[in-house]
Image: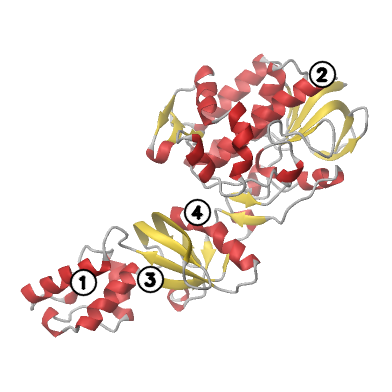
Amino acid sequence: MTYDVIVIGGGPSGLMASIAAAEHGAKTLLLEKGKKLGKKLAISGGGRCNVTNRLPEEEVIKHIPGNGRFLYSAFSVFNNYDIIRFFEDLGVQLKEEDHGRMFPVSNSAQSVVDSLLNKMEKLHVDVRKNTSVKAIHYSEEGHTIILSDGEKIETNAVIIAVGGKAVPHTGSTGDGYAWAKKAGHTITTLYPTEVALTSKEDFIKNKDLQGLSLRNVAVSVLNKKSKPIITHEMDMIFTHFGISGPAVLRCSQFVVKELMKGREEIPIEIDALPDHNEEALFREINTMLKKNPKKTIKNIFKGIVPERFLQYILQKNNVAEEQKAANIAKESIRAILHDMKHFTFHVDGSLPLEKAFVTGGGVSIKEIVPNTMQSKKMHGLYFCGEILDIHGYTGGYNITSALVTGRLAGVNAAKEVSGR
């Protein structure tokens, strides 16, 4: 049997590509090696599915630090606002939450997945689950998909939408890179992004702060001259192996890239009080000390930072919690405040790519036509989603990239076929 378009991979970009190809009149087949479609969508946003982000286009692209600028052409055809309209037309009502994140009103990722599957059914997209692709044979006339059981399926166009190597239990195990290479594509170095970081510092090994969450702190990755490469102000958490949480995940790719350059340890600086000026705090605390000479130092600082963090900083600066305000040196106060504003330690790595939320690296975007997602190396070959060397922060940005590139791949694969 011959198809106009075969899409490999049933994640967000693959589902979108199948719908777009079928809408444009292509006889479409979707192949998925797992037993479920939309597995990554179903677990995204904590099972609520953060489908996209409502921030202005410029901002969305800024939140895709891994080659986001490549998406300018794609966004001129189909962007984040089009995604919102697309889902509302499918009957999925969306609501906006913090930082422009868009979620289904139902708070259920499954309702998003179901809306896509229903649309595919209406468009008569053929779907084969539990079907692994062993190889793709490219030729001048068309391409042949060879399945694991030896079956061969002919097609005029192939869309590779198999994801990267992050979150492998959803089926993203890096299968597509070999097929891309066979067509003449370059795969840039793969590395984990949106990933927890590891540290060998004593306070981590001793679990002094394990489980402690810090809210709205500024986390910075420092360069060799101790200047910030990047700063993100969000929540974070200390773990038994290092640090994690939203601010850390966003900073992680910058750490990984520095380590890839050969640096062995990267300094991280935490400002636990980003809205306060250090000098003004020092004057404020000094006034309190003078007014309350009998108060313990622990009570003077109470509520400024979480108690466990304060205990650790006092201990680090050899100040007893019960020490009275009257007996404390100004230098000690300065040192304590400096630690609250510039808590610095080293990280030496990250969890492996399999434990990351997003894959950095992939099929080189230099070899992809930016407004169609077509391969510059092979006719009738398209790429979309995380297999491309594009990655964003969590918050609906990666799904946006997947849906936009999927849309373009589907539309243009169908057009190429009908044009032939």
In the image, 381: left or right of 332?
A: right
Q: Earlier in the sequence, mark 2 or mark 4?
A: 4
In the image, 89: left or right of 385?
A: left
Find residue 249 and report its horizontal and vertical position in percent: 50, 55
Verify CB contact (< 8 Å) between mark 4 and mark 1. Answer: no
Give amino acid for label 4: Arg
Question: Camera-side residue: 226 or 145?
Answer: 226
Dot 4: within a 10 Å radius of its alpha carbon, few (fewer than 14), some, or many (20 or more) residues? many
Instruction: Work out how far the residue at label 3 is from the one at label 2, CA to CA, in angstroms.
Output: 61 Å
Dot 2: within a 10 Å radius of its alpha carbon, few (fewer than 14), some, or many (20 or more) residues? few
Relative to 365, residue 352 above or below: below
Verify CB contact (< 8 Å) between mark 4 and mark 3. Answer: no
Find residue 71 and report its horizontal and vertical position in percent: 61, 38
Dot 3: within a 10 Å radius of its alpha carbon, few (fewer than 14), some, or many (20 or more) residues? some
In the image, 388: left or right of 131?
A: left
Q: Which residue is mark 2?
A: 419
Q: Residue at x 78, y 18 (%)?
A: 27
Q: Residue at x 63, y 32 (%)?
A: 74
